[in-house]
Image (spheres, grey):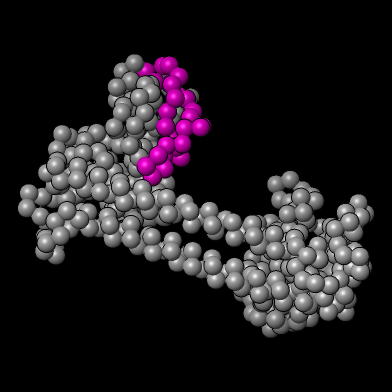
Amino acid sequence: MDREVEKWKEKIPSHWEVKKLGELCNTTSGGTPSRGNKNYYNGKIPWVKSGELEKGIIYDTEEKISEEGVKASSAKIFPKGTLLIALYGATIGKLAFLGVDAATNQAICGIFKSDHLDSKYLYFYLFFSKPTLVNQSIGGAQPNISQAIIRGAPIPLPPIAEQQSIVAKIEELFSELEKGKEQLETALAQLKVYRQSLLQAAFSGKLTNPDVKEGELPEGWKWVKLGDVIDTCLGKMLDKSKNKGTLQPYLRNINVRWGMFELVSLEQMKFEPNEEERYSIRKDDLIVCEGGEPGRSAIWKNQTKNIKIQKALHRVRTHSNLKVDFLYHYMKYSAISGILEKYFTGTTIKHLTGQGLKKIEIPLPPLIDQEEIVQILESKLTVCDKIEETIKQSLAQADVLRQSILKQAFEGKLVGG
């Protein structure tokens, strides 16, 4: 860690110091009273768990413990204003301030106030340093930031007044950044609404027949059940102990994304000669997920032969009066609008069985109308996709910019000394 101290000294203004956190602040972790004694719980002392560090400032907690529980465990009451940091688990490195006196569990380290260190300055520094702290963590399946790592963290230390000026500038810039992110997220939400309204117009007939009456279909359209206009087959059950035949690649549920396939991890299983045709897929088959977001679909545009499907997928082939692209867009519309859910089975885990798939009702226009609708949808949705990609890139850049602001702050480049 001394090397890290020297590295910081090379970056900061000459009037700054570099101190280890343990030289500036006292730290300690919390504890958990025995769950076997009910008298230790349902008391009046707020008791913070690491999952609650998302709140920024903690004024109340899900659970409270008693004074008896504090005395019988390693739990301690930390004063209001203490900075908390999660030591391990999914929340590792998360930060929050106590807005009230409270105790914490052992997965949290409390960092007490110091006369030499502005608490918000420390908060922003630890937020900036999270990747470094996590990289030093010990443990395999569950990395752990020890108190020794926290106490040994080097902190670039300007005079207290300059720390406060830096905090004010960070908060000003972060506020502007958040406003920009809110605008981008609003644009994403509006894009989602536009997509839904576009698809709704397409399948109500209004996209190509703007004068059609509400609740009616355009002339020449009709409602049909999918079972009347498709042939479908559920994939083969995976049972490596019983399968005989030749090893061949097959698609799983995880290989299917809306409109595309991820083929990087194709597995193989054995198929017998009499199963070749039944479980094979060919160009322009629609592949539909039976479970794990049932209804998620993609059109197989690949010419690759000898690709099969596992039981978690339906292979759908449309009759001559239904374009597969039209059906794909209808499946997407049905999924995002909630229409598809009424065809699912199961409560906690949902499935779209073969019978459920065949029962799905779809508005069926003449082929010429289907072609026009698909052309309009794909043109407009492609534009939406490009806009969405640009917005998401901007959101990602905002996170990079946040770290850049902090880097400048702690190298003494954000405000004048």
Question: Does the segment drawn in magenta span residue 299?
Answer: no
Foreground residue among 319 and 50: 319
Q: Is residue 186 left or right of residue 134?
A: left
- Residue at the location (43% across, 64% down)? 187
The x and y percentages for residue 147 are 84, 61
Quarter of the picture containing the C terminus is bottom right
Q: Residue at (43%, 21%) from the top-left corner?
A: 248
Please tell me in which quadrant of the rendered image residue 160 appears: bottom right
Residue 40: name its quadrant.
bottom right
Figure disc tally: 0
Examine the rendered structure and indicate whether residue 257 appears above or below residue 178: above
Residue 158, horizontal then vertical, whole percent: 86, 71
Q: Is residue 374 visible?
A: yes
- Residue that sits furthest to the front in the current view: 416
Tell me, yes or no, whether the highlighted magenta stretch contains residue 257. Answer: yes
In this picture, residue 328 sits left or right of residue 29: left
The residue stretch that appears in magenta? 245-272
Q: Is residue 226 visible?
A: no
Q: Using the image as rendered, state which of residue 401 and residue 249 is in the foreground.
A: 401
Q: Which of the 4 quarters of the picture holds residue 129?
A: bottom right
Compared to residue 331, the image places residue 314 above or below, namely above
**In percent of the image, x 24 and y 45: which residue is there?**
374
Q: Is residue 269 above or below residue 61?
A: above
Residue 246 or residue 43, whichever sits in front: 246
Image coordinates for residue 382, horizontal then vertical, percent: 36, 48
Whole-percent x, y for residue 234 in the image: 31, 34
Is 359 drawn above or below residue 244 in the view shown?
below
Residue depicted at x 30% and y 37%: 286
